[in-house]
Amino acid sequence: MSLRVNYYQQAPGAVQAMMALEKYLATIADQPQGLPKTLLELVKMRVSQLNRCAFCLDMHSKDSRAAGETEQRLYLLSAWRESPCYTEQERAALQWAELLTNLSQTEVSDACYHEVKQCFSDKQMADLTLAINAINGWNRFCVGLGAEVGSYQVGQFD
């Protein structure tokens, strides 16, 4: 898909705010109380699969590989429930990502929250929810207003 509206030029303040979210998430990745970068990338990939965002899938598959993710785990991501290669924490994060991405079709019950919460501290839950919110926002920019799929280079937005 080609760019329909250059949102970087038309809404620079919004893009700056979204980039600030990404910078925050980068600072907490792999910190003692943070979330693993590989987990964050898996979440971004899964949400982008659900939203059918080709640009973000291209970006986060490249970023995942650069962070040490294996091809096999990337290939199996859409079938994570059936695949034995994801940790309990990754499964909880992917479940939370799917629930929050599909809010119009699902319910976030207390039971589901408590199941996911067993794998994360309160801070990690807040950060994970923020990461899911951020990638959903980027997906909507890219799917709605377009993006040059395949053009992303690792580290381009650092």
Image (cartoon, rainbow, N blue to C red):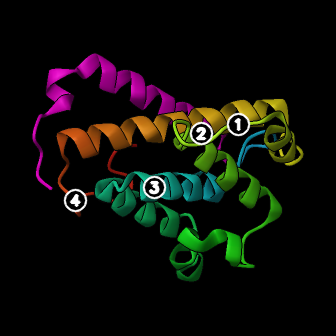
Counting from the top left corner in percent of width and height, residue 126 is at: 70, 30
Cα–Cα gap, marks 4 and 3: 17 Å
Question: Marks 3 and 1: which is nearer the front?
Answer: 1
Label 2 amino acid? Answer: Leu
The span picked out in magenta is: 1-29
Q: State the SS at label 3.
A: helix
In space, the residues marked 1 and 4 are separated at their CA atoms by 33 Å
The image position of residue 156, as x and y in percent, is 32, 50
* Residue matched to label 3: 50
Q: Are marks 2 and 1 in contact (CB under 8 Å)?
A: yes
Residue 46, position as x, y percentages in the image: 52, 58
Q: Residue at x 64, y 70 (%)?
A: 80
- Closer to the N terminus: mark 2 or mark 4? 2
Mark 4: amino acid = Val
- Is 12 rendered above or below residue 110? above
Label 1 sits on residue: 108
Residue at mark 2: 100
Q: As shown in the figure, which amino acid type bears the numbered disc 1?
A: Val
Give the SS element for disc 4: loop
Characterize the local packing of mark 3: few (<14), some (14-19) or many (20 or more) Cα atoms within 10 angstroms: some
Looking at the image, is mark 3 or mark 1 earlier in the sequence? 3
N-terminal-most mark, 2 or 1: 2
| 4 vs 3, front mark | 3
Mark 4 or mark 1, which is nearer the start of the sequence?
A: 1
